[in-house]
Amino acid sequence: MLKKRVFRKIIMTTAVLFSCFLMNVLPDNEYEYVQSLKYVSNYHEEVIYLIDQYQMVARTKIKVEEEKDVKKKAKQLIEMLIKEGEGEAKLPSGFKNMIPSDTKIIGIDYKDSVLKINFSKEILNISEKEEEKMIEAIIYTLMEIEGVEKIILYVQDEILTKLPHSKKNLPATLDRSYGINKEYMMDSYKEIDAVTVYYVSKYNEDYYYVPVTKYMNDSREKIKIIIEQLSSSPLTSTNLMSFLNSNAKLLATQEEVDTLFLVFNEYIFSDMDTRNILEEVIYSISLSVRDNYDVKEVVFQLGDSQIYKSVIKTLE
């Protein structure tokens, strides 16, 4: 016991002397940086949806203080979406937020997987051109929070049921089925299906993902449409890319409890020798599956052999 006390005193004395050394030797800003390293572990990346350079709602990441509580995390992320707010400086280069400045969060409630956000009336000061994208960014950002299945938006204690300018109707409860970066590809207004596909885009040297909800007259399995869209070339929007080989074919699918099995031909690989699947291919397919299927895992197969398993909730 005595040895332990002596050893503890030596450690404490050493720590104090080292801190004094840093204060006297390092410039103020460098000392502050060293001190800040203590708190690095409290910060991590969160997914957020922002407007990119092509005016599309894009999936990107910000580094914020780790927060476990759903309501506190929702407040933290929404504040990042408010223009000229404290969080604006943390946004990645090439992206911007959408909610009008001076918008306040009046209240947040979370119960039975439903997240309710009450905004001040300033949120209605959005342009008609941007109003739908703002709603999409809010929905998709909040839906990234684990445990959130539905969202209700309020303005001054009243449920927001119409977009402020176009007067388009909004469902009382919102989720990803609302769509994002909407693209209409129908020949008829009958039997319309919506399929959300995640593409890759690029800012400087960094890749990120852009979801596009396509409305079409196509009753096939959604996964077949997803793979067809990702393997098609050229894409409608030149800024959107897919790394899936145009020769990749989906040979079979099977949906079991919480899992979607996808059987491909050998062109799913980026390199036949290493049998490697590109991360961008895994993410594009897995995120697309997440938005269209109620599953927790996506299993990639070549014949009867599993070549990769993607766990939906770990996608970052």
Image (cartoon, rainbow, N blue to C red):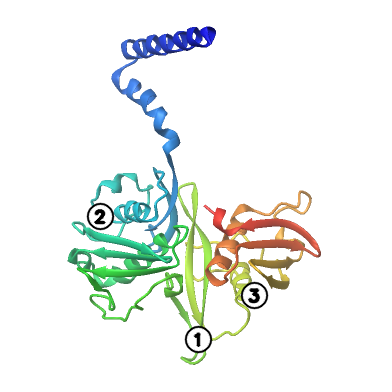
C-alpha gap between disc 2 and disc 1? 36 Å
Mark earlier in primary sequence (2, 1): 2
Mark earlier in primary sequence (3, 1): 1
Which residue shows up at 30% across the image and 60% down it? 108
| Amino acid type of the residue that numbered disc 1 sits on in the rendered structure | Ile
Q: Which quadrant of the structure image shows residue 173?
A: bottom left
Q: Which mark is residue 83?
A: 2
* x then y, percent, for residue 117: 30, 64
58 relative to 30, above or below: below
Give the structural element (helix, strand or loop) at label 3: helix
Which residue shows up at 32% across the image and 14% down it? 23
The residue nearer to you, when weighing 229 against 37, is 37
Label 1, on which residue?
Answer: 192
C-alpha gap between disc 3 and disc 2? 39 Å
94 relative to 159, above or below: above
* x then y, percent, for residue 88: 29, 48
Label 3, on which residue?
Answer: 224
| Amino acid type of the residue that numbered disc 2 sits on in the rendered structure | Lys
Which residue shows up at 36% across the image and 10% down it? 21
Q: Farthest right residue?
A: 304
Give the structural element (helix, strand or loop) at label 1: loop
